[in-house]
């Protein structure tokens, strides 16, 4: 399963030393990243911050998470505040981070922690909570409670696969990579060690062109000794999902500018998130027939361009139709008009934000419905008729050319 570097054709220059956690910790003490959820040296970590950041960081970058983390701390400063919040408020604060089942699990987990009185401090205890898998449990146990646990995510898999030149491709290599990662965890400072490996993967052992010359594990790293570090981790090629197509219908109400939205079913893709009404998403969807799926009768305009979004398992292309309706138009059953001032509270996923941005950027091109004729006002006397003014008589033009004519001709 794990092939030593000696299996490569190029001979290694002498036996490699074992990777030492102490070397990595020395590097970490000098180069650790400053992150909003990371406790400063000598300060006890806050399990709520550690847990919240680890849930947010799943499948997402540090840069993308930072503003969401700040927003969550402002709205829900502790786990009790998060547990007590309505689900819609949590989903709205999460909107844009993707993988929305995580937000629902986050909320359920907060309630479970409050019911239990505190966060469990072991991997086994943490794994019993909603939304906490092997990686997150290891990360929280190590970082928040200094337990000697391995936290193995994609970054750590990359570091370990390079360090030991693991030939087996992902995803099958995961158990072997986890076992190897566990052999590295020290009894002293396991929380710092977990963060040190994360930092190594994020800053030096990057997916492309790792900065091996600066790496504290350069000597023991087998792939570095072979010069093959760029080729790890080995991966099986994954078939991309088939392209799906569909239509999205953006309805804007005249007067207050409210937008028609609905809530998606609670389970499945983008479960319980908000969206403008859309058709089915299918590989064979025909946009020319899309108006059969429109949520209401209106003067629909097909907007130029396509909104593209890539989900984990398939890419999506949406053709956007837009209509403006009269101010008194009721929302169809199961839908609602949301005022512009309240759009920020709607849990709109990234794909639907793209749809709305696409439509609203072009709204000036969409004709507004004709205003209804004014009601006859019989109570107010009509204003006095303006005096009849005679139009000036037209000048009788002389047939003789004017003196300016020759100049104009020049
Ligand atoms: S030596 Fe290079 S490939 Fe090996 S762990 Fe360090 S940065 Fe990664």
Image: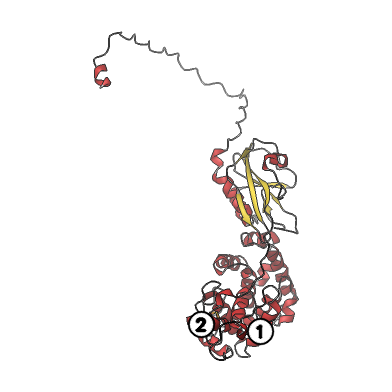
Give how far apart the Cα atoms at labels 1 and 2 are: 19 Å
Q: How many marks?
A: 2
Q: Position of residue 106 (x, y in %)?
A: 69, 68
Q: Does the rendering let one see residue 119?
A: no
Under tag 2, what secondary structure? Answer: loop
According to the picture, the residue beneath numbered tag 1 turns out to be 180
Asked where in the image residue 289 lies, by quadrant, the reply is top right
* Residues at marks 1 and 2 touching, judged by CB atoms closer than 8 Å: no
> From where the camera sits, is residue 29 visible?
yes
- Ligand 1 lies under 8 Å from the Cβ of mark 2: yes
The local secondary structure at tag 1 comes to: helix
Where residue 85 sits in the image (x, y, percent)?
68, 64
Q: Characterize the local packing of mark 1: few (<14), some (14-19) or many (20 or more) Cα atoms within 10 angstroms.
A: some
Image side of residue 372 versus residue 126, left or right: left
Percent from the top left, x then y, of residue 345?
A: 63, 56
Q: Where does the N terminus fall, quadrant-wise? A: bottom right
Left or right: 253 in relation to 112: left
Residue 262 at x, y = what percent? Answer: 70, 49
Which mark, by number, is residue 215? 2
Give the position of the C terminus as an image quadrant.
Answer: top left
């Amino acid at each position: 399963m794990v092939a030593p570097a000696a299996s490569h054709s190029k001979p290694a220059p002498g036996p490699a030393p074992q990777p030492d956690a102490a070397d990595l910790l020395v590097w970490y003490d000098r180069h650790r990243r400053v992150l909003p959820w990371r406790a400063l040296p000598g300060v006890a970590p806050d399990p709520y911050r550690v847990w919240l950041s680890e849930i947010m960081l799943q499948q997402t970058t540090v840069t993308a998470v930072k503003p969401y983390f700040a927003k969550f701390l402002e709205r829900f400063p502790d786990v009790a505040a998060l547990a007590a919040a309505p689900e819609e408020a949590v989903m709205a604060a999460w909107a844009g981070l993707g993988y929305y089942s995580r937000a629902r699990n986050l909320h359920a987990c907060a309630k479970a922690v409050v019911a239990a009185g505190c966060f469990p401090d072991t991997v086994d205890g943490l794994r019993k909570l909603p939304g906490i898998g092997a990686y997150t449990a290891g990360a929280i146990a190590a970082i928040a409670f200094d337990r000697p646990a391995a936290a193995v995510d994609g970054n750590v898999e990359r570091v370990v696969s390079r360090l030991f030149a693991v030939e087996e491709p992902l995803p099958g290599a995961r158990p072997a990579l986890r076992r190897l990662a566990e052999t590295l965890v020290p009894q002293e400072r396991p929380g710092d060690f977990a963060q040190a490996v994360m930092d190594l993967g994020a800053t030096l052992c990057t997916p492309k062109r790792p900065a091996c010359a600066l790496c504290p594990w350069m000597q023991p790293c087998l792939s570095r000794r072979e010069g093959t570090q760029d080729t790890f981790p080995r991966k099986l090629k994954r078939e991309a999902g088939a392209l799906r197509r569909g239509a999205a219908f953006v309805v804007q109400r005249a007067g207050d500018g409210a937008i028609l939205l609905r809530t998606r079913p609670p389970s499945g893709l983008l479960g319980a998130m908000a969206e403008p009404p859309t058709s089915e998403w299918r590989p064979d969807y025909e946009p020319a027939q899309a108006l059969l799926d429109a949520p209401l009768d209106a003067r629909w305009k097909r907007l130029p361009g396509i909104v593209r979004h890539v989900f984990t398992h398939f890419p999506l292309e949406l053709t956007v139709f837009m209509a403006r309706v009269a101010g008194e138009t009721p929302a169809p059953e199961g839908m609602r008009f949301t005022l512009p001032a309240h759009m920020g509270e709607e849990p709109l996923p990234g794909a639907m934000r793209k749809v709305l941005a696409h439509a609203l950027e072009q709204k000036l091109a969409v004709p507004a419905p004709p205003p209804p004729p004014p009601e006859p006002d019989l109570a107010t006397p009509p204003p006095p008729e303006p005096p009849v003014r005679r139009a000036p008589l037209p000048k009788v033009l002389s047939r003789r050319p004017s003196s300016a004519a020759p100049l104009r001709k020049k």
